[in-house]
Image (spheres, rainbow, N blue to C red):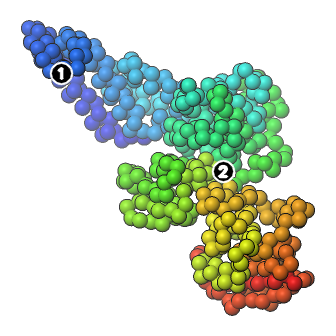
């Protein structure tokens, strides 16, 4: 809500400007209107654009209509009401401002209108859901006329291959409603425009957004296919049923009993304010530098600082004043963050980048030859792979974001859970001369990864693994001779874990 003195200030400015308009109208209403003709004709330049009569320039009605539209626009910008509005209402307000059909900017009208709009937030939520449902394509049988399903289709998302921003507003409304369900901040109106631009670079490809709550793919003909988590579809239908209690069948209002594995929720997404700052600085493909907007630092200092931490987490080196330099093209990695809203969950994936000191020691122990084929399971951002031959190294990684980083760095990358991937590799007879790994430690996964990796080491090859110090001298592998490094303590940022490096040679 805006404070009263802001409204008072705008009303004062409006009255002052309106009085000046009336003075100008009065000044040029008589003979001086004819004098202005010479100014217009004499100063229009040699380009020869058509002249505009003084009478037309100084029409009172047009000036007052523009003045009203400008001040209504400023008033709405004082609050978050445009962000809360459903797309249909935003379209109506934008149309009235653009076409200059807003009501007179009188104090009683302004205050009453703002009070009504600000008091309608709860109503806006239901209107958003209704607007989303009404704007689903009627041409596709995927959409049910009785309620939201897990999958839905929206049409006309493009205007001659460009994004139709009004239609993108309904995607934004869907994201805003689901953000409300998740207890998350909401995207600002227009917040999905950059997402839709990104989807234009990935025609027909499913993209997971907003922490796994939604998946979306865009086709060249302008249709957007969306999948929502079943829990979210149920909640959308619950709101729809409150509007149309007799029209929504009970099966659409029944909470799903079983979660669908493909919609397993990721960690809590980043705030939309952070994502918007990152999206605004998204570089062109081929650029290795990113510059955070200085105006964002002024208006959103906390989100700006968090955006900087995100860039550092994916390998950006601060250069000062919001600048970051990367050792790879971060374009695709940033797209993954903007879409998913997430960074890899360290607790879920146990991702802790391998410190350079540990990586260097592990590489020395591996003794990689000029023709050795190499594998790094659970590669993360390539802390070990950085020191391995790119043309002979395969990286296995579960995080989509990390895969984008590895691919940008030039590594052959496979997106998979290593413990699931290894069975197929074994059946295909894949073997490697060197397997380098820094596996996840929790819940016995380190030992499981070591046993799986050993299956892929050819005779005479080496398995080198960074493991918890507690496993030192306790690992046995049939057909391998094992040696250990000394213990490294407090090398991993944010943890107190001690590690040792195991080298297992296949004999």
* Residue 331: % across, % down: 55, 52
* Residue 359: % across, % down: 64, 78
User: What residue does disc 1 label?
Assistant: 45
Q: How crowded is mark 2: few (under 14 residues within 10 Å), some or many (20 or more)?
A: many
* Residue 493: % across, % down: 58, 76
- Figure quadrant of the N terminus: top left
Along the line of sight, the residue nearer the viewer: 173 or 10 = 173
Q: Residues within 10 Å of mark 1 (few under 14, many from 20)?
A: few
* Residue at (77% x, 28% y) in the render: 142
- In the rendered view, tell whether residue 156 sits above or below residue 54: below
User: What residue does disc 2 label?
Assistant: 211
Along the line of sight, the residue nearer the viewer: 15 or 452 = 452
- Figure quadrant of the C terminus: bottom right
> Is 396 displayed left or right of 79 in the figure?
right
Q: Can residue 305 be seen in this view?
A: no
- In the rendered view, tell whether residue 369 sits above or below residue 285: below
Q: Do the residues labelled 1 and 2 touch (CB within 8 Å)?
A: no
């Amino acid at each position: 809500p805006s404070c009263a003195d802001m409204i008072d200030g705008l009303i004062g400015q409006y009255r002052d400007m309106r009085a000046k308009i009336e003075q100008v109208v009065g000044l040029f209403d008589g003979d001086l209107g004819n004098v202005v003709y010479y100014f217009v004709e004499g100063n229009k330049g040699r380009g020869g654009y058509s002249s505009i009569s003084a009478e037309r320039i100084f029409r009172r009605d047009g000036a007052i209509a523009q003045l009203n539209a400008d001040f209504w626009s400023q008033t709405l910008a004082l609050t978050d009401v445009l962000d809360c509005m459903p797309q249909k209402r935003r379209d109506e307000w934008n149309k009235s401002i653009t076409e200059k059909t807003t009501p007179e900017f009188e104090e009683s009208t302004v205050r009453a209108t703002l009070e009504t709009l600000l008091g309608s937030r709860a109503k806006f939520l239901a209107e958003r859901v209704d607007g989303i449902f009404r704007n689903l394509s009627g041409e596709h049988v995927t959409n049910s006329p009785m309620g939201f399903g897990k999958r839905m289709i929206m049409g006309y998302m493009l205007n001659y291959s460009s994004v139709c921003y009004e239609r993108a507003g309904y995607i934004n409304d869907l994201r805003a409603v689901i953000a409300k369900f998740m207890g998350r901040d909401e995207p600002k109106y227009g917040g999905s425009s950059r997402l839709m631009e990104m989807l234009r670079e990935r025609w027909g490809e499913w993209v997971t957004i907003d922490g796994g709550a939604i998946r979306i793919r865009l086709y060249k003909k302008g249709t957007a296919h969306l999948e929502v988590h079943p829990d979210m579809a149920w909640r959308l239908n619950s709101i729809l049923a409150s509007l149309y209690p007799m029209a929504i069948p009970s099966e659409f209002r029944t909470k799903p009993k079983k979660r669908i594995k493909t919609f397993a929720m990721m960690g809590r997404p980043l705030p939309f304010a952070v994502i918007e700052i990152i999206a605004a600085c998204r570089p062109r493909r081929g650029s290795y530098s990113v510059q955070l907007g200085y105006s964002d630092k002024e208006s959103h200092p906390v989100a700006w600082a968090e955006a900087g931490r995100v860039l550092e987490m994916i390998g950006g080196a601060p250069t000062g004043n919001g600048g970051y330099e990367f050792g790879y093209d971060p374009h695709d990695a940033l797209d993954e963050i903007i879409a998913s809203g997430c960074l890899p969950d360290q607790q879920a994936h146990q991702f802790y980048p391998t410190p350079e000191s540990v990586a260097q020691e592990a590489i020395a122990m591996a003794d990689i030859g000029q023709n050795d084929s190499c594998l790094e399971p659970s590669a993360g951002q390539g802390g070990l792979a950085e020191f391995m031959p790119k043309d002979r190294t395969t990286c296995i990684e579960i995080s989509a974001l990390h895969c984008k980083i590895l691919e940008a760095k030039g590594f052959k990358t496979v997106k998979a859970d290593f413990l699931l991937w290894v069975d197929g590799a074994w059946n295909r007879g894949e073997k490697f001369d060197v397997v380098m790994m820094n596996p996840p430690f929790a819940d016995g996964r380190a030992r499981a990864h070591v046993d799986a990796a050993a299956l892929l080491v050819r005779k005479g090859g080496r398995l080198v693994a960074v493991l918890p110090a507690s496993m030192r001298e306790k690992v046995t592998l049939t057909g391998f001779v094992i040696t250990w490094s000394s213990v490294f303590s407090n090398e991993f940022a944010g943890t107190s874990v001690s590690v040792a490096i195991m080298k297992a040679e296949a004999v």
